[in-house]
Amino acid sequence: MAIIDALSTGEELTATECAELTGLSPSATAYHLKFLERYGLAEPAPVRKDGRERPWRSPDRRTQVELDTSTPAGAAATTAVGLAFLDSSRAIAEEFIAAGSKEPEEWRDATALANTDLWLTVEEVGKVTDALAAALDPYRGRALADRPEGSRRVRVMNLVSPRRKR
C-alpha cells in the first residue's frame, strides 16, 4: 500500500527509493513492483539519464482495486486489500482532523466531510462512479512541474458502497 500511495502522487521512484519508504530490501521491493505491474497498479517509467536507475510510476493516478472474488483465497485477498485501502485513507483524514487548529484556515474551510445515502440500481451506481471519476480527471496526471503554486497533496476518496441487505 505504501508503494501504491507513493506512486499515486505522480512521482517516479526506483525500487531502492520505494524500499526506503517500506523498510523492505530493494530486491523485495522490486518483487512487489513487478507484482503491482501485473495488476495494473505500477509500470516501468522511462530510464533515468544515467541509464542505471529504473524508476516505476503509476499508470493511472486513480487507485482502483478490482480483485477476483471467485475463490476463497481471492475473496480473502479482496477483503484484506479493501480494508487496508480504507484504513490508509481514514488515517490521512484522521491526521488532518486531529491537527485541525494547526492547519491554515483556508485549508480547514476547503475540507469536505460528507456522505449521502441514495436508493440506486446497479446501473445507476455505475453512472455515479463514472461521474465522480470524471469530476477528478482534470486534476490527475499533474507532474511535479505542473503543480499550481500553493497546491498540496489532497486525498479524494470515492466510496460508493451498497449497504448490506439485512
Image (cartoon, rainbow, N blue to C red):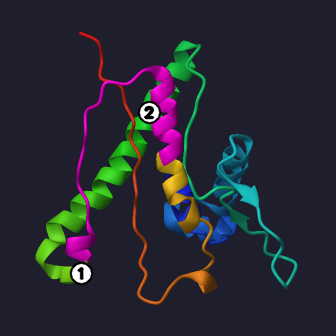
Where residue 62 sits in the image (x, y, percent)?
56, 53
Could one spot residue 86 in this view of the protein? yes
Label 2 belongs to which residue?
A: 80
In the image, residue 122 lies in the stretch drawn in magenta: yes
Instruction: Note whether 55 is above or below 104 in the view shown.
Output: above
Horizontal relation, residue 85 to residue 103: left or right: right
The image position of residue 95, as x and y in percent, is 24, 64
Q: Is residue 83 left or right of residue 59?
A: left
Quadrant (top left, top right, bottom left, bottom right) of the C terminus: top left
Asked if residue 146 is among those painted magenta in the image, a careful observer would answer no
Say what secondary structure mark 2 lies in.
helix
Task: Please give the name of the residue rendered at 53% of the width and 14% of the height, measured from the top-left corner.
Answer: 72
Q: Residues within 10 Å of mark 2 (few under 14, many from 20)?
A: few
Q: Where are the magenta residues, as a range?
A: 107-131
Residue to which mark 1 is pinned: 106
Q: Position of residue 81 (x, y in %)?
A: 47, 37
| 148 relative position to 50: left or right | left
